[in-house]
Image: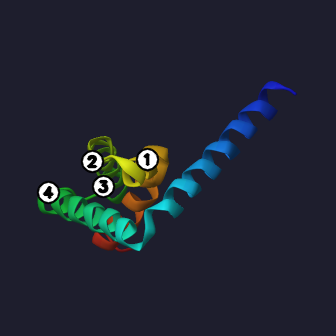
Amino acid sequence: MGFFDHIKDVIEDAGKHMQDEINKLGDAGKKQLEETALTMATEYKDGGGSDFEDCVVAVAAGLAAYGASQSGPLGAAIGAGAGIPCARIACRRVFPE
């Protein structure tokens, strides 16, 4: 197995792990994550932010900190990468095209 094949396998495994952790959340956990992301995106805009991409970075960073403070499936899902898609969705709601 070559280097790039190994990298591809690692990325695929990480994606599967993230999906497993998100599935463990249940509807209440998903709703909590969505609401937290939307609150952060709104606060970013209300604080003078005006750019979708910068919003995504700010919200993803905020969700990473939030995830680190949580335990159980919610913290694990955010740690596994769920914060970035949630940040993109929340920021798109605040900064529609």
Inter-mark Cα distance, 3 to 1? 23 Å
Mark pair 2, 4: CA separation: 22 Å
93 to 91, vertically: above or below: below
What is the crowding at mark 1: few (fewer than 14 residues within 10 Å), some, or many (at least 20)? many
- Label of residue 55 in the image: 3
Q: Amino acid at mark 1?
A: Ala
**Visible in this render: residue 92?**
no
Q: Which residue is under mark 1?
A: 76
Q: Split into 4 quadrants, where in the image is the N terminus?
A: top right
Pick whichever, 63 or 56, lies toward us: 63
Amino acid at circle 2:
Tyr
Q: Check if mark 2's residue and mark 3's residue have beta carbons within 8 Å.
A: no
User: Marks 4 and 1, Cα distance to the nearest angstrom?
Assistant: 31 Å
Q: Which residue sits furthest right?
A: 1
Type of residue at label 4?
Gly
Above or below: residue 71 compared with residue 32: above
- Quarter of the rendering containing residue 68: top left
Q: Residue at x 27, y 47 (%)?
A: 66
> Within the image, what quadrant is residue 64 found in?
top left
Disc 4 residue crowd, few under 14, some 14–19, many 20+, Cα 10 Å: few
Label 1 sits on a secondary structure element that is helix
Task: Determine the secondary structure under disc 4.
Answer: loop
Select label 4 or label 1 by which is in front: 1
Residue 50: x, y in percent?
23, 59
Q: Amino acid at mark 3?
A: Cys
Q: Position of residue 36 (x, y in %)?
A: 26, 62
Looking at the image, which residue sits at the far left?
A: 47
- Dot 2 corresponds to which residue? 66
- Report the residue at 41% width, 73% height from top: 27
Q: Earlier in the sequence, mark 1 or mark 2?
A: 2
